[in-house]
Image (spheres, rainbow, N blue to C red):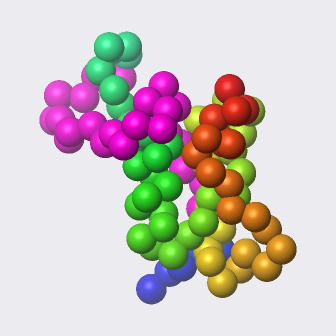
Amino acid sequence: MIKPRVVVTEVQVEKGSIDFIPSYSNEFELYEDDIPKGASPLSMKKLAETKGYKLVAANKGCYNLFFVRKDCMHDLSELTIEDALKNL
């Protein structure tokens, strides 16, 4: 089983700290702005935690979240979704 030390995910930052995962659709349209395309930061953090990862960073726009495997955290601090969203 592959367990990377670091995982980077793209999230639907517009959903903020709401627990949101869009329904799957065969009719996916890349450029329809009114249809959500990805999971919220909170939903992705919850999923990562079930897999053994902690949120440690977000890029400036908060659309990329950086997770580190728990056994590799060492001196890193866990980041809350609220703190990550301050980068907006």
Give the quarter of the image for residue 23.
Answer: top left
Q: Is residue 12 magenta?
A: yes
Q: Is residue 21 magenta?
A: yes
Quarter in which the C terminus is drawn:
top right
Residue 36 appears left or right of 15: left
Quarter in which the N terminus is drawn:
bottom left
Tell me what residue is drawn at x 62 percent, y 74 percent: 69
Give the quarter of the image for residue 71.
Answer: bottom right
Q: Position of residue 32 (x, y in %)?
A: 32, 14
Tell me what residue is drawn at x 72 percent, y 32 percent: 87
Above or below 67: residue 65: above
Residue 39 appears left or right of 75: left
Above or below 71: residue 78: above
Total marks shown come to 0
Residue found at the far right of this picture: 75
Given residues 64 and 49, the one toward you in this image is: 49
Given residues 23 and 82, the one toward you in this image is: 82
Residue 25 appears left or right of 6: left
Residue 75 appears left or right of 71: right
Q: Main secondary structure of the magenta part?
A: loop
Q: Which residues are magenta?
A: 6-30
Question: From where the camera sits, is residue 66 visible?
Answer: no
